Image (spheres, grey):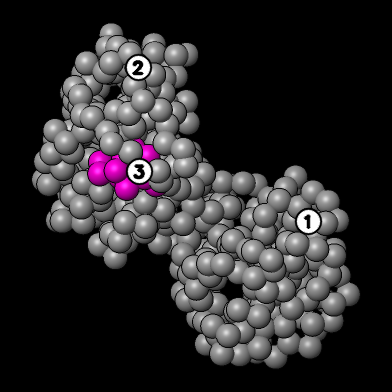
Amino acid sequence: MALHKKNVENLQVSGKRVLVRCDFNVPMKDGSITNDNRIVAALPTIKKLIENRAKVILCSHLGKVKTEEDKARLTLAAVAVRLSELLGKDVAFAKDAEVVGANARSAVEKMNNGDVILLENTRFRPEETKNGEAFSRDLASIADVFVNDAFGSAHRAHCSTVGVTEFIGGETAVGYLMNKEIEFLGNAVESPERPFVAILGGAKVADKLNVIANLLEKCDTLIIGGGMAYTFAKAQGHEVGKSLVDNEKLDYCREMIAKAEKLNKKLLLPVDTAVYGSFPDPIDAEIAVNYVDMDKIPADVLGLDIGKKTCEIFAEAVKTAKTVVWNGPMGVFENPVLAQGTIAVAKALAEADATTVIGGGDSAAAVVQLGFADKMSHISTGGGASLEYLEGKGLPGIEAIQET
């Protein structure tokens, strides 16, 4: 995994046209942005380029564009308005259905040093997701330098993340956000300060197959909670009632238990669980749960969170760690009653004297929702990208960038 990429700090950009791939895939309702975190997160890179007198050209995707109706709904016009407010300067919006069209080319030609323009949603071009050459060349044709700051899209080889790097004449680099992901996520797994504890949760074993195998080789202790813990329990011969089970992955779980033993790694599985008769509907419905040992789950209930004894065991394991990577909640954290396990783990991380990295997706949402965000060393901005990084895979959007 290449961890030493050229970054925005090292670039000479005065007077140059710099194309920046951002992650402006923000939630929208009726044409308004409902959460601007991703726009705010892009500001340090954009401001650095403005300060260094670059001509800053921003691009991003937004949602999935399949129809003409989608195009009307998924324009980036509102992002340009919000960016103007946040930067305190005008951000021109180049509204072209073909993204790099007459409006964009004309706007770029008129740019002064320190100006900012935003291109239309890159997915308005169907070849974006296929990494087609024509669109990659179009993007490269309006820029001298390329900066990728969209970690959430780094696991996809698209025109705006990978293809453009093949045709751009000048340097390529990562932005501050991307650099932070490489430093924290990459280094936490590849060269951690030990003891290194990895915590995996979430619903299905199938989603985390390669992550489990990779982290078992890298960490000292692997903790497994969430829905997938019941597949491990069944693999050990326990009855799990109506709990979520990935029956096709029972052998895999047994292999991982054996692998941990062989590698002399500690594999911690829940010893007790919060049970209820059905999945809560609505998800935040008031329910009264019972706590039972993991090997004594009655036939008519399902496990929905780790139990109190497990919370203590997991928290104890985190206490002495120097590096902790966490991906996936311990239970149905959207329900206050079933958030106890996730809260206990988050609290243990918040109090640990360790580098704590939250690997995107639901665990990132949980940490933010439960109020522990400012206590973590790093919360990843990418769900799928974080997972693939934790699997030990190289990400195309990072690999395409020049080394330092």
Residue 130 rendering spot, x and y as whole percentages: 75, 45
* Label 1 – label 3 distance at C-alpha: 37 Å
Question: Which is more toward the observer, 226 or 224?
Answer: 226
Q: Residue at point 60% right, 79% down?
A: 83
Query: In the picture shown, does residue 117 fall above or below 230?
Result: below
Identify the residue under disc 3: 286
Residue 169 seen in render: no
Q: Are marks 1 and 2 in contact (CB under 8 Å)?
A: no
* Label 1 – label 2 distance at C-alpha: 44 Å
Question: Which image quadrant: the N terminus?
Answer: top left
Q: Which of labels 1 and 2 is toward the front? A: 2
Identify the residue under disc 2: 300
Q: Which of labels 1 and 3 is toward the front? A: 3
Q: Bounds of the magenta span? A: 329-341
Which three-letter amino acid code belongs to the residue tagged 1?
Asp
Question: Which is more toward the observer, 344 or 195?
Answer: 344
Residue 343 is left or right of residue 71, and the answer is: left
Q: Secondary structure at mark 2?
A: loop
Which three-letter amino acid code belongs to the residue tagged 3?
Glu
**Sequence-earlier tag: 1 or 3:** 1
Where on the picture, by quarter, is residue 137? bottom right
Question: Which is more toward the observer, 117 or 271?
Answer: 271
